[in-house]
Image (cartoon, grey):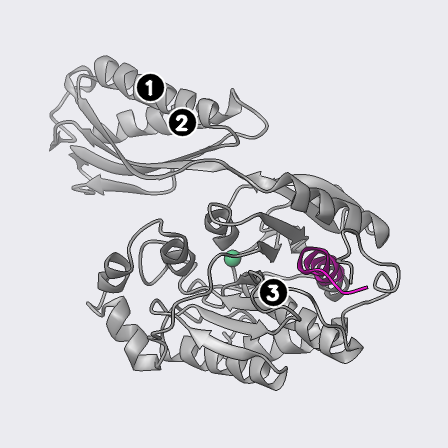
Amino acid sequence: MAIATTNPTHLTSLRVNGARLWKSLMDLAQIGATQKGGVCRLALTELDGRGRDLFVQWAREAGCSVRVDAIGNIFARRAGRDNDLPPVMTGSHIDTQPTGGKFDGNYGVLAGLEVVRSLNEAGIETEAPLEVVVWTNEEGSRFVPVMMGSGVFVGAFTLEHALAQRDAQGVSVGEALAAIGYGGAESPALPVGAYFEAHIEQGPVLEANDRVIGVVLGALGQRWYDVEVQGMEAHAGPTPMALRRDALLAASELVAEVNSIALERAPHARATVGSLEVFPNSRNVIPGRVRMSVDLRAADGAMLLDMDAALRLACERVSLARGLTIGVQEVVYFSPQLFAPKLVDGIRSTAAELGYSAMDVISGAGHDAVYLARLAPTAMVFVPCADGISHNEIEDARPEHLEAGCNVLLLAMLRSAGVTA
Ligand SMILES: [Zn+2]
């Protein structure tokens, strides 16, 4: 009995059922469907509960056993020949942004389910068991932090911390889990043999290069800051220009400086000011205080450190020039995360074997896979989405691209799980 290290020839003709995958995506998208064709299914709401119920029903119909852990992650397991082997996992999330789409997260979960259904149909048994996972609250829209379920799973923060987080109405994660019946007690199987995640790209690179498969090398590191500019409020009429300490003017200069920090480090650096709060925000008062967010991203830790220094220097420069104070507080840090080279190579060669055009990409966004990579060999498969748009009701993807990504996922998972020759 030999475990295949490459895709055995009798398996390379194996394909998923793209029409069935598409239908499942459309069926799940009915739950929380919005007028504009998107989905609003916030984490741990009644709608999320219904989406989970549908997944669990499908997984059981596909012969999987289902476990739910204490943070509500759902593990649907397809038994292998040797169930003492660590499982080969795939998955993503089914919670969405308030104005979310049909594909972000949902594709990764349902692609995993389609892999199971296709193997059932072909009568193929893997050596290691397979698991399709739904991670709780990836989006972080209702409850912070983002990627909560996978974060607890890999020990990035504690279960107690996650359960105690509250939404804007004061409902805790623990209460919300109980309300939808997904506060499980079972602990997940550890270790994990390998983790794969299929996802829409959420950016424009694949489409611009006319490629079907993105071979994801890893994810950009992220540093998030709250920056507070403290100037002096004064009457907009009597105060001469030279005597002002205008916090919004200083903040505007900082916005431009932040932009330059990334431009000077192209192509893999990003820098964004996404939120500004102006106080007192009154037409005839010189702004005395501004709170702003800064989001810095880069592919390697040294560059991210260098960008951090550049941000602090820019704040010093502006505060000196404008005679006001600027406070910088770091609120989130994710180190850059490279995926497992062996699995990444496997994704690349599988795409080539199947005749799909592919290119290497780096994920600019966070994903559950970025956490999983701390625990297990991990890789991701990206497929294009229309105009690179996601976190939007118009988010769209082509059925044939989703099918292609799922075929790559299928063969990559078989390679990791092993198939008896
Ligand atoms: Zn996602």
Residue wearing tag 1? 314
Q: Give neighbour class at mark 2: few <14, some 14-19, many 20+ (Cα, 10 Å).
A: many
Q: Nearer the viewer, residue 28 or 34?
A: 28
Q: Which mark is residue 96?
A: none
Residue 107's tag is 3
Describe residue 343's horizontal placement relative to residue 131 as left or right: right
Q: Amino acid at mark 3?
A: Tyr
Q: Percent from the top left, x then y, of residue 277?
A: 25, 42
Q: Residues within 10 Å of mark 3 (few under 14, many from 20)?
A: many
Disc 2: which residue: 258
Crowdedness near tag 1: few (<14), some (14–19) or many (≥20) residues, C-alpha within 10 Å: some
Locate residue 83: give its quadrant: bottom right
What amino acid is at disc 2? Val
Above or below 58: residue 286 = above
Mark 2 or 3: in front is 3
**Contact, mark 1 vs mark 3 (Cβ under 8 Å):** no
- At label 1, the amino acid type is Ala
Task: Name the residue: 53% across, 31% down.
Answer: 299
Question: Which residue is at 65% across, 67% downward?
Answer: 111
Give the spatial CA distance, label 1 vs label 3. 41 Å
Magenta span: 404-421
Whichever of callouts 1 and 3 sits on the residue coming sooner in the sequence is 3
Q: Quadrant of the C terminus?
A: bottom right
Measure the C-alpha gap from mark 1 to mark 2.
8 Å
